[in-house]
Image (cartoon, rainbow, N blue to C red):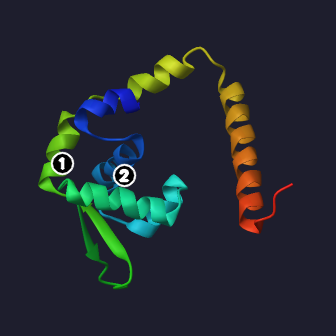
Amino acid sequence: MDSVLRPYDLGSVQWYVLYQLATGGPTLQRDLVRMLEIERATMTGIVATLVRKGLVEQEADQADQRQKLLRMTAAGAKLWGELPDIGFIRSVAFDGIDDAEIATAIKVLQTATQRLETLLQKGTYP
């Protein structure tokens, strides 16, 4: 995915933020943190980069001034329209693999991730 996006000066997480804004409309930054399951500080850096590139604008939410509402700019929408369809990545990677096997792999990876996150939150390592 990063190889396909590199000519557009985008990383995969930047693409996911643009995807959400293009398909779901304006979104609170905190909601993107939850959706993408990344650290708040990481999202802050990604959003700052997208704002600097002129692809996203950030404003205080009307309901809660502490929250930041993100929306795609005209330049962001133009770039989004120029990006290649990356749906082929999923089909190349997963075509021919049974849905049940994919579901099992997802469950195993989610469980492993949750266990590691719990360990990191406790701050104690074996």
> Along the polypeptide, which appears first: circle 1 or circle 2?
2
Q: Residue at x 12, y 53 (%)?
A: 74
Q: Residue furthest right?
A: 126
Kind of residue indicated by mark 2: Val
Q: Position of residue 91 (x, y in %)?
A: 48, 21
Q: Residue at x 43, y 60 (%)?
A: 43
User: Where is 22 relative to 28, above or below?
Assistant: above
Q: Position of residue 25 (x, y in %)?
A: 29, 58
Q: Is residue 25 visible?
A: no
User: Where is 88 relative to 76, above or below?
Assistant: above
User: Where is 21 relative to 31, above or below?
Assistant: above
Pick the front one: 118 or 93 = 118
Q: Position of residue 120 (x, y in %)?
A: 72, 60
Which quadrant, please, contains the N terminus?
top left
* CB contact under 8 Å: marks 1 and 2: no
Kind of residue indicated by mark 1: Ala
Q: Residue at x 72, y 66 (%)?
A: 121
Which quadrant, please, contains the C terminus?
bottom right
Q: Position of residue 101 (x, y in %)?
A: 71, 26
Q: Rate crowding at label 1 as few (under 14), some (14 to 19) or many (20 or more) other CA atoms within 10 Å.
A: some
Q: Is residue 90 left or right of residue 73?
A: right
Residue 83, located in which quarter of the rendered image?
top left
Q: Is residue 64 left or right of residue 31?
A: left
Residue to which mark 1 is pinned: 77
Pick the front one: 3 or 67 = 3
- Assign a secondary structure to mark 2: helix
Q: Rate crowding at label 2 as few (under 14), some (14 to 19) or many (20 or more) other CA atoms within 10 Å.
A: many
Residue 64, located in which quarter of the rendered image?
bottom left
Mark linked to residue 17: 2
- Assign a secondary structure to mark 1: helix
Q: Residue at x 26, y 39 (%)?
A: 9
User: Where is 125 relative to 58, above or below?
Assistant: above
